[in-house]
Amino acid sequence: MANVIVAVDAMGGDHGPQTVVSGAVDALEDNAIDKIILVGREGDIRQVLGALNYDENRVEVVHAQEVIGMEEIPTTALKTKKDSSIVVGLNLVKSGHAAAFVSAGSTGAVLAGGTTIVGRIKGIARPALGVVFPSTRGYTFLVDAGANVDAKPEYLLQFAQMGACYMEAVMGIETPKVGLINVGAEREKGNALTKEAYGLLAASDLNFTGNVEGREIPLGAVDVAVCDAFVGNIILKYSEGFAKGIMSMLKEELMSSGISKLGALLSKGAYGRLRKRFDYTEVGGAPFVGLNGLVVKAHGSSNAVAIKNAVKQCSKFIKADVVGKIREKISHEGVEENGI
């Protein structure tokens, strides 16, 4: 297999090049990734690299003078800032110089750029953002978590197909269970979108188990949970806040008395493992599935650990050939490009 080369947006995220460059270089440690390409203002990148120990043969710097801000209109920024770290990084994937691109920058710009520069897989109507959630039975892939606020039933079917490909290839789950996120388990529940999508999913060759309510996701009721991005992003953001809140409340209660503190000390290892399961930095990023190459969106507030894990995550995706498997699945379904 060819070397795994990952391009990283060194200018993206809330903490700037210091955090991103450090995390990206750390991803080289266990050799999951062969080479890192750091994209952004070369002077800023070199300044950070100067304080790090790394193999110079495995790190390349590609200069990009401009930066797309979080507040900018994505489509306008992509047209006017051709020398931005996002545009240059995505073009590295398009040209084949890199197998993946990771950015903690503007979600809208990364998605719009991924669609227009890297391009959709033939037959895919809309790429989708997929997020891996921890559950009592392992993990659930939530898709769409942020790309398509307005969706059609046919989109949800493709989201399900792509999610199933991801869980099979990356997580090793045979015939993953697929559920449609809804306000009730009964088939007749929901709005026009979910009712029609239910019929399409039920008629597909997916292992569709029916509607799934939000409370069932952390219980591992399904391996792939499908919805539009309006619903998915609310679930994602609420879950992030809930995890932080529950951990904070738990710490407060454990520190409330001497006996509680003793119990906390004895259970320190278990609490640490639980915190790690809910920590988004352990996953690092969310892939845009449906593109002709791998594009991963890291959280804007990502620390160096999150960036490292987002880069390392690319290795699994690439080696499992998720893009190829999605392409094969959609081709097998006989869907014509732009036919949805």
Image: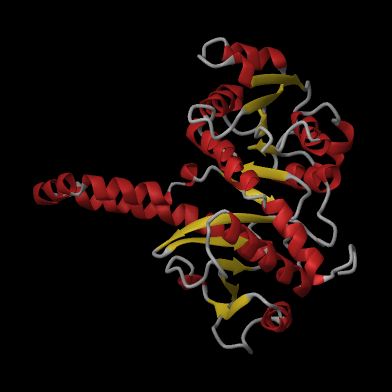
Report the side of 289 relative to 95 (left or right): left
User: Which colour scheme appears in the figure?
Assistant: secondary structure
Give the residue drawn at x 78%, y 45%.
Answer: 114
Residue 266 appears in view:
yes
Give the residue drawn at x 80%, y 43%.
Answer: 113
Percent x, y of residue 133 = 50, 57
Q: In which quarter of the image is the C terminus?
A: bottom right
Q: Nearer the viewer, residue 259 or 30?
A: 30
Report the side of 195 relative to 250 (left or right): right
Question: In which image quadrant can residue 184 be found?
Answer: bottom right
Residue 299 appears in view:
no
Q: Which of 314 and 240 is in front in this view?
A: 314
Question: In which image quadrant can residue 227 be found?
Answer: bottom right
Percent x, y of residue 78 = 84, 37
Report the side of 103 relative to 338 (left or right): left
**Residue furthest front in the image:** 1
Q: Which of 185 and 319 is in front in this view?
A: 319
**Residue 5 in the image: above or below residue 327:** above
Q: Quadrant of the N terminus?
A: top right
Percent x, y of residue 24 = 57, 28
Give the residue drawn at x 61%, y 29%.
Answer: 34
Give the residue drawn at x 19%, y 49%.
Answer: 267
**Residue furthest left in the image:** 259
**Residue 286 in the image: above or below residue 168:** above
Q: Nearer the viewer, residue 304 or 1?
A: 1
